[in-house]
Amino acid sequence: MTIDLQYLPSIEYFCAILKNDEIIIEAHEYFEKQSYRNRCRIQTTNKIDTLTVPVQNGNKKVLIRDLKIDYSQDWTRRHWGAIHSGYGKSPFFEFYSEYFKKMLDKKPDFLFDLNLELLTICLKLLRLEKKIIFTEYYQKNVENDYRGLIHPKRNHDSNNLYQSSIYRQNFGNEFEPNLSILDLLFCQGNQSLSVLKESLKIEQIN
């Protein structure tokens, strides 16, 4: 499959990865605003918080690999504060949190590099081994195209990738589906892959 690289992606994103043996990361697209390329959703005290990575020249036509992160805003402290507030008391926070904090503290220049390293960490913690390659140039039409499919403005029910497999979350009485993979990892730890497999829809994309 070919898919865009996202920031601390959703469970649905990892369902897509789970059902494909070869993962082709789109490395030559233009950055798309208001997408999951620079944002994710986590659960904090009785609400869902959207964390957004600020970028330089995000309003211009910039290739994703050339897009720099804007560190003039203290977003890493804000993100880590929200993550710690939401998951600091979760069962597996102490085991997994340093992987993510160290990565944010590294402050890579480019969004693509940040997302790729975070994806690598997530796959490692999930114990999910996949072959990852990168596009060499942009093609409008490709087979098994997942680019833009997992999007804030698109309901996950329409994608036939993810179905809610309920697990114990930290807040609220109702289960919040399809949050960032952080929610699953911090709440379920070494059972995360089993939950992910239960969350995978059998149907293929139409």
Image (cartoon, helix red, strand yellow):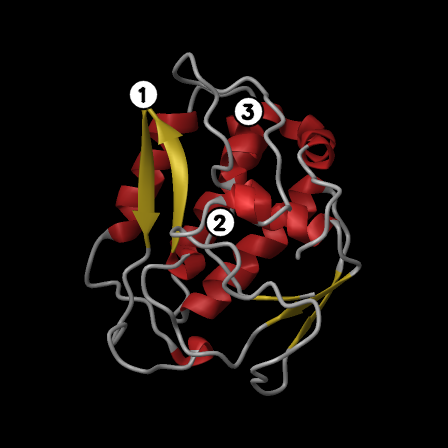
Viewport quadrant of the C terminus = bottom right
**Circle 1/circle 3 CB separation < 8 Å:** no
Viewport quadrant of the N terminus = bottom right
Label located before the other in sequence (2 or 3): 2
Q: Which residue has dot 1 on it?
A: 46
CA distance for labels 1 and 3: 16 Å
Q: Is residue 81 above or below residue 69?
A: above
Q: Which residue has dot 2 on it?
A: 8
Judge the density around disc 2: few (<14), some (14-19), many (≥20) Cα neighbours within 10 Å: many
Closer to the camera in the image, 89 or 3: 3
Please tell me which residue is depicted at 67% across the width and 55% down the height of the picture: 205
Nearer the observer: mark 1 or 3; the answer is 1
Amino acid at the residue labelled 2: Leu
**Does dot 2 land on a helix, a strand or a loop?**
loop
Question: Which label number is shown at residue 127?
Answer: none
Label located before the other in sequence (2 or 1): 2
| x and y percentages locating residue 45 in the rendered image | 31, 21
Question: Which label number is shown at residue 187?
Answer: 3
Amino acid at the residue labelled 3: Cys
**Does dot 3 land on a helix, a strand or a loop?**
helix
**Does dot 1 land on a helix, a strand or a loop?**
loop
